[in-house]
Amino acid sequence: MPFSDAEVEAAVRRLEEPGRLDAAQRTVAAQAPALQRILNQALQDADWFGPAHRDEVRKAAEAADVETAIRTLVAEETRVAMLVGAAVGLELANQLSTPQEDT
């Protein structure tokens, strides 16, 4: 996918337009179970919920400011899920734009 930084930035700006994501949200909602499986597999493949993550959860639960620590951890998890979702979206767009042979 040979897109320049400027092309990607312009596309992201267009996504901010009101209503721009309505159709995409309906499509994603219809495919939510399959997309959830893909997200879960990506997180599992990256050992996201392995020992390091359990340690971070434990640290957050034992922190002096538990609320802030947990909010920070949840925000980080949300960012990771969003980035995985963006990667899946890019690959899905690639798959949809590339003719596939029936198998």
Image: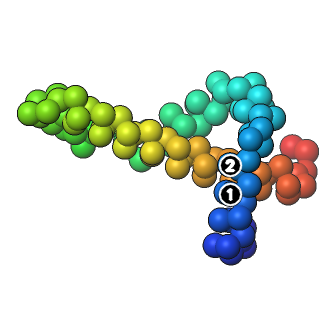
Residue at position x 58%, y 31% in the image = 37
Q: Secondary structure at mark 1?
A: helix
- Residue density around tag 1, few if under 14, some if 14–19, many if 20 or more, within 10 Å: few
Where residue 76 appears, as percent x and y from the top left, is: 37, 43
Query: Mark 1–mark 2 contact, CB under 8 Å?
Result: yes
Total numbered circles:
2
Element type at marker 2?
A: loop
Q: Is residue 65 above or below residue 91?
A: above
Residue 22 pos. (x, y %): 77, 34
Farthest front residue?
18
Locate residue 53 relative to residue 11 in the image: left or right. Answer: left
Q: Amino acid at mark 2?
A: Glu
Q: Residue at x 66, y 27 (%)?
A: 32
Identify the residue shown where x is 72% and y is 33%.
25
| Location of residue 36 by image quarter | top right
Q: Quadrant of the C terminus?
A: top right
Query: Can the viewer see residue 51?
Result: no
Give the residue displayed 52% in from the left and 49% down from the top.
83
- Protein image colouring: rainbow
Q: Which residue is mark 1?
A: 13
Gap between marks 1 and 2, in whole Å?
Answer: 5 Å
| Vertical comparison of 49 with 95: above or below | above
> What number is the disc on residue 68?
none
Q: Decide if residue 63 is on the left or right side of residue 28.
A: left
Q: Which residue is mark 2?
A: 16
Q: For residue 28, say whether it is visible.
A: yes
Residue 81 coordinates in the image, percent (x, y):
49, 41
Mark 2: give few (<14), some (14-19) or many (20+) Cα within 10 Å. few
Residue type beneath disc 1: Arg
Quadrant of the rendering where the N terminus is positioned: bottom right
